Image: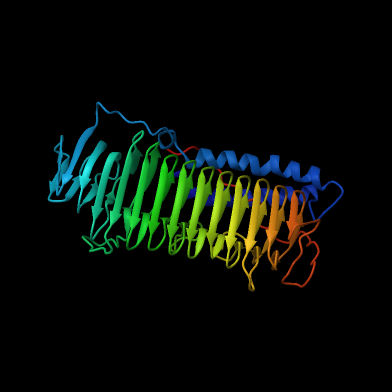
Amino acid sequence: MKNLKHLSIILIVAVLASALLLSACGIIGQSASADNTASTLSSGTSSVAAGEAYEAAFSDRDLSGEYDSDGSVTILLNGASATASSAAVQVSGGTVTITAGGTYVLSGTLENGSIIVNVSKDDKVQLVLDGATIHSEIFAAIYVVQADKVFVTLADASVNTLSNGGSYVQIDDNDVDAVVFAKDDITFNGSGTLHITAEAGSGIVGKDEVTITAGVYEISAAKHAIRAKDSLAIADGSFTLTAAEDGLHAENSDDDTLGNIYLAGGSFVITVGDDAIHANTLLQIDGGAFQITAAEGLEATYIQINGGDIQISASDDGVNAAYKSTSYTPTFEMNSGTLTVVMGAGDTDAVDSNGNIVINGGTIDITGQSAFDYDGTAQYNGGTIIVNGQQIDSIPNQMMGGMGGMGGSGDMGGSGGMGGGRRH
């Protein structure tokens, strides 16, 4: 079984454990020992959870980006078709179908066609893009029908381009709607560059887990830039994402314990029409640099920030902890890092929670009319809060009017840290 799919159980355990820890330590509102308490909470839950999340999200092969060039199959794209050095590659016009596990190195240009992976459920496939340009007028450039897992490796110093011409004509029962569409787990790694243009649909869609550990990505999409069903995990990389809808999106409409996003690092410039980063269940940010221009910056049921530099310019809410999943009480939790939110005019909030707000550390710098809006309780245990250039020592509740004071213990939902064993 895939460990990440079962993180929801681990997450709920972490929630309960953190709630007990908070109760035992008496971390309710502000106190003379708030700084010490916040430090204990951070080292006792958030940092450990961050390490466990990294181990659970990324396998050694996810992170390596290496491949065996001597034992690989060569696929040469030559305009209208392709040639390959193995019978495991079937070529019919512009359609190149891989039928067995292994490593395949692709180079050249495919002017109107697709790479299709359809292997045994137990087979892993590594697609090494080494100067590959693949365009499909009416379908996905890369389509994973079936595999245990597919690795898309960007070869060192390579520049690769994948694109769709504006429509999708289906070839089976799956509703393919992205330039890269995977029915099973897919990982992107390597140090090269990948340009993706989706005139219709999304840039990357994974109907299971999507993992990215390195590389340079420039994605422009008519819908979402990157969308996963069960989970989206990013260890590192450079991302320039432009989309009409969301930048990073994870949602499982069949199981609301899934739909998690975990961001351990990377550099992101996200310019989108809706949410920059949207997770139905948990959004955990442990590091990275984010330049966000969007309607909403961050949205999930539980939003936990353990590090990173996040700069948001939003026309709606900057951060929104909303009822997307029954697995958590909506909560915004800040433990470390920097969050800067600049709001547009209108009835919007920099940090909006349908439940609770917990600030244990880090810096929150807000420019706008409404800083905080929450339905539940608020805890300020440490860190720095600046609103319109003025440092404050509480969490005002704009919804309640004025400086709403600090809430009691309430049901704060606990720590949203991800955990579990290393994946394979």
Q: Residue at x 21, y 34 (%)?
A: 73
Let me know if residue 73 appears in the view: yes
For the view shown, which residue lies furthest in the top direction?
70
- Of residues 402 and 380, the one drawn nearer to the viewer in this rendering: 402
Q: Is residue 59 left or right of residue 171?
A: right
Image coordinates of residue 26 in percent, x first then y, are 80, 50
Image coordinates of residue 338 in percent, x first then y, are 66, 48
Let me know if residue 416 appears in the view: no
**Corner quadrant of residue 408:** bottom right
Q: Residue at x 41, y 37 (%)?
A: 62
Q: Residue at x 59, y 44 (%)?
A: 286
Q: Is residue 54 left or right of residue 351?
A: left
Quadrant where the image shows the N terminus: top left
Quadrant where the image shows the C terminus: top left
Q: Is residue 40 above or below residue 281?
A: above
Q: Is residue 364 above or below residue 62?
A: below
For the view shown, which residue lies furthest in the right direction?
32
Image coordinates of residue 190 in percent, x first then y, are 39, 36
How was this image coloured?
A: rainbow
Image coordinates of residue 339 in percent, x first then y, are 65, 52
Q: Is residue 134 left or right of residue 240?
A: left
- Of residues 347 and 91, the one drawn nearer to the viewer in this rendering: 347
Q: Is residue 394 above or below residue 104?
A: below
**Corner quadrant of residue 165:** bottom left
**Corner quadrant of residue 137:** bottom left
Number of numbered labels in the structure image: 0
